Image (tube, rainbow, N blue to C red):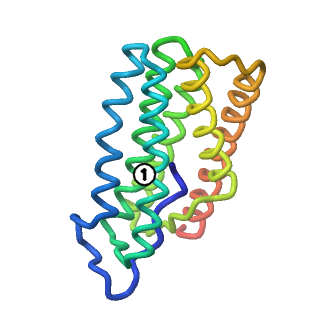
Amino acid sequence: MPRGAEPPPAEGSPRHALLTLPNLITLARLVMVPLTVWLVVQHRLDLAFLVFLAAGISDALDGWLARALGARSVVGAMLDPLADKALLVSVYVTLAVIGVLPDWLAILVVFRDVMILGGLALLWMLGLRPTIRPLAISKLNTFAQLALAGLVLFTEGFGVPLGPAVTVLILATAVTTAGSLIAYVAAASGQLRGHG
């Protein structure tokens, strides 16, 4: 699942190619998003977990293939984080809708991503070219979000109680989500001050 954006395309690679094998795998992961949402809404969290797991495997696979085949591309660098975010946000929102995750947590996750995208758009409109590299807190947040989504789908889908683990992960996800948002806002503010 999300590891940040793909590395930049290697020199001599088809920078704007769409139909590479890694990109096709990423597109297949995008197709898994509505399927996962439908399964969650139907309360088939066992099958939703398996699709979520397949998406995670495909995420690791497309990144490895892009490096191994020298098939890194601009399209892949944009599609990969888009597929990851679409899946995570969709899972959080639908799990909140059916009452499995707290609605405030889903709102926080969505709010963070909207704020970051809005900040990037603002910097671009001001003529700045922000460097997009995942911060350490953001990587930790991605791990927490993935772990919580997967754990909840597994425990609810297969009826395996894991005690306080879900509660601990909910708190960890909330803290790292808020911390990641604050870190990105601080970084963007620094760029704006430098621009002024």
Q: Nearer the viewer, residue 123 or 114?
A: 114
Q: Residues within 10 Å of mark 1 (few under 14, many from 20)?
A: some
Q: Residue at x 44, y 42 (%)?
A: 54
Q: Quadrant of the C terminus?
A: bottom right
Toward which corner of the image does residue 47 lie, by quadrant? top left
Amino acid at the residue labelled 1: Ser
Q: Is residue 15 left or right of residue 55?
A: left
| Spot occupied by residue 39 in the image (x, y as percentages of width and height) | 37, 22
Q: Is residue 125 left or right of residue 192?
A: left
Toward which corner of the image does residue 191 lie, by quadrant? bottom right
Residue lying at the far bottom of the rendered structure:
12
- From the viewer's perspective, is residue 12 above or below residue 161? below
The number of discs equals 1
| Spot occupied by residue 13 in the image (x, y as percentages of width and height) | 31, 82
Q: Residue at x 41, y 68 (%)?
A: 65
Q: Which residue is mark 1?
A: 58
- From the viewer's perspective, is residue 142 above or below residue 34? below
Of helix, strand and loop, which one carries label 1? helix
| Spot occupied by residue 161 in the image (x, y as percentages of width and height) | 69, 17
Q: Nearer the viewer, residue 195 or 96?
A: 96
Q: Residue at x 45, y 63 (%)?
A: 63
Q: Nearer the viewer, residue 122 or 106?
A: 106
Q: Residue at x 43, y 14 (%)?
A: 43
Q: Is residue 175 left or right of residue 34?
A: right
Q: Is residue 195 left or right of residue 11?
A: right
- From the viewer's perspective, is residue 130 above or below residue 150? below
Toward which corner of the image does residue 79 lie, by quadrant? bottom left
| Spot occupied by residue 139 in the image (x, y as percentages of width and height) | 63, 53
